[in-house]
Amino acid sequence: MNRVNTLLSKKYDSKYWKIGVCIYMITAAYLILFQSFRGLTSDDLFYSDFPAHLNVTSHSWYSLYHFPVLIANYIGGYRGAAIASLIVILCCDFLCIYSIRKYFAEKISNRYIVDFLSVAVLLVSMIIIVFRERWYVGIGTPNPWHTPTYRVAKPFSILSFYYFLRLYENLHLKIDGYKKDLALFSVFSMLSCAAKPSFMLAAAPAYIVMLFYQLIKEKFACLMDCIYVGLSLLPGGLVILFQNYITFQAPPSGDTSHVRFGINDVWSSAWVLKYHSMTGVSFIDGAVCFAITIFLAAGFPLFVSLVQARSLKLSQKCSLLIYLFATFFNLFAYEDGFRKYHGNFGWSYLYALLFLFISALEGLLCNPPENKKVKAACWILFYLHLISGIIYYIKVLCGFLYY
């Protein structure tokens, strides 16, 4: 924490940040406990994925999150598993706040803005439209509250992104100049995969494309550096292969589901609008539904990217690539069998939204538009996402369905 503070200006009182973090952690703990003990069926208040994950067996685990849960379940039963889950998730939430704060502290000099963003980024959501009963389904949010594995993987994903950007900016150095960052990037990428593979499914190809671009741009002068970074992704790749094995092929589950590719079957089934109620022309209606869905989920970061198209920062370019790959998976990839409409490839899209917001805020604050009206429009969109996110969080805190 002291290291972060030294990166910022001295005349500053951190008590407001500490109060904000305490409020967030207390409400988060309250929500996790009620989701764990009360949300057992879709008819109950606080319905979520927590009970399913807390009842995980040694034959159905796939995530790093499940290790302490399994041990605690063995020692103290369901109650023990719930307490272990609470501790793990709160630690990961705090690591998220710390990591985001650290990231912005290196870009922005105003400590109050840095502290505000470190919490605000974990609250932003889709823009809520009041005439729709289901706010989340079909649109998505960078901050879903109903599943533990997403929240456990989030800080490791943020740190993987952070260290990749550091590596990318230092490829011209000898390996001694970035070997520590290389090791940390490899470790955090692997932990992100181990907690939930969704982020790395979209991030790894984005990283590789950026490395390949740099390789061509520098006429293969950084070939060995790119190879080192590529090799550092291998531990995460091995973790994903292992997860694939225990999820689909390993006995005794006997689950023969496979990854399939289709034409926007799964995602479109939950879009915010249904095309048959509009023009009656399927292609046009589908395009309109897609555009509305995309805007409600990512209106702010995409508008900032459009405004700054000629001066995008490295983080914006990287997050946009991640978003493109994640959108592709969400549109065309799915699991067949009973998992088909679980929308598990949609998790990559939700992670991509988070990094769009982080990088867009960096771009907006470090390179603000000269036109005051355009700048105001950017901030209006951000606060629409933030206010919607607070409303969504309060709704979930009150026990209503997350979708």
Image (tube, grey):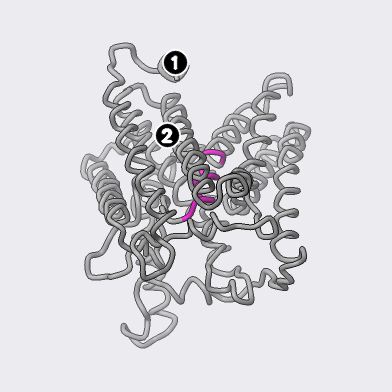
- Please name the residue shown 40% across and 72% down the image: 271
Q: Secondary structure at mark 2?
A: helix
The tag earlier along the polypeptide, 2 or 1, is 1
- Please name the residue shown 70% across and 59% down the image: 59
Q: Is residue 77 left or right of residue 230?
A: left
- Please name the residue shown 54% across and 64% down the image: 330
Q: Kindly identify the amino acid type of the residue bearing the numbered disc 1.
A: Asn
Residue 142 among those drawn in magenta = no
Quarter residue 312 falls in: top left
Q: Is 344 placed above or below 257 here?
A: above
Viewer-proximal residue, 199 or 393?
393
The residue labelled by disc 1 is 2
Q: Is 295 placed above or below 386 here?
A: below
For disc 1, the neighbor class at 10 Å (few under 14, some 14 to 19, many from 20) is few
Q: Is residue 179 left or right of residue 391?
A: right
Q: Kindly identify the amino acid type of the residue bearing the numbered disc 2.
A: Ile
Q: At which x and y percent is residue 343? A: 53, 67
Q: At which x and y percent is residue 185? A: 64, 34
Q: At which x and y percent is residue 61? A: 65, 55
Q: Which residues are magenta?
A: 147-156
- Please name the residue shown 37% across and 73% down the image: 288
For disc 2, the neighbor class at 10 Å (few under 14, some 14 to 19, many from 20) is many
Q: Residue furthest bottom?
A: 280
Which mark, by number, is residue 97? 2
Magenta: main secondary structure equals helix
